[in-house]
Image (cartoon, rainbow, N blue to C red):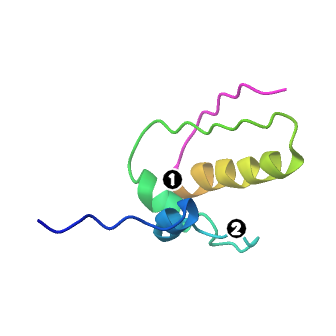
Amino acid sequence: MAAAHIASTPVASLEHDIYPITGAVDDYDSLLELIGDRRLVLIGEASHGSHEFYRERARITRRLIDGLGFAVVAVEAD
């Protein structure tokens, strides 16, 4: 039996799932593809108060509304 491939570092094991956020319009295209026709999307974070997270959450929310037709956003936030 062949040994399973084990990545040398945690980052190496995630490389095929990491997408850089560059500020480009298409930053979240792959996320929207993953969401598909789902009716519920949860966005979590562990850094309450991070302006970078709030900015990106707003971008994702806008894409959910404009791109996928979501009509309701419920937020647990500061």
Above or below, 65 against 15 in this view is: above
Of labels 1 and 2, earlier in sequence is 2
Horizontal relation, residue 4 to residue 51: left or right: left
Mark 1 crowd level (few <14, some 14–19, many ≥20, 10 Å Cα): some
Let me know if residue 37 is in the magenta part: no
Q: Amino acid at mark 2?
A: Ile
| Gap between marks 1 and 2 measured at Cα | 20 Å
- Magenta region, residue range: 69-78
Closer to the camera in the image, 6 or 61 = 6
Residue 3: quadrant of the picture? bottom left
Tell me where residue 38 appears, x and y as whole percent: 40, 43
Residue 56 shows up from this direction:
yes
Q: Is the C-beta separation of discs 1 and 2 under 8 Å?
A: no
Mark 2 crowd level (few <14, some 14–19, many ≥20, 10 Å Cα): few
Residue 78: quadrant of the picture? top right
Helix, strand or loop for the magenta stretch, by majority: loop
Q: Amino acid at mark 1?
A: Leu
Residue 17 shows up from this direction:
no
User: Label 1's element?
Assistant: helix
Closer to the camera in the image, 74 or 65 = 74
Q: Tell me which residue sits at (68%, 52%) in the image.
A: 62
Q: Kindly identify which numbered label has been placed on residue 77.
A: none
Tell me where residue 75 appears, x and y as whole percent: 70, 28
Q: Which residue is mark 2?
A: 21
Residue 49: quadrant of the picture? top right
Q: Kindly identify which numbered label has been placed on residue 68.
A: 1
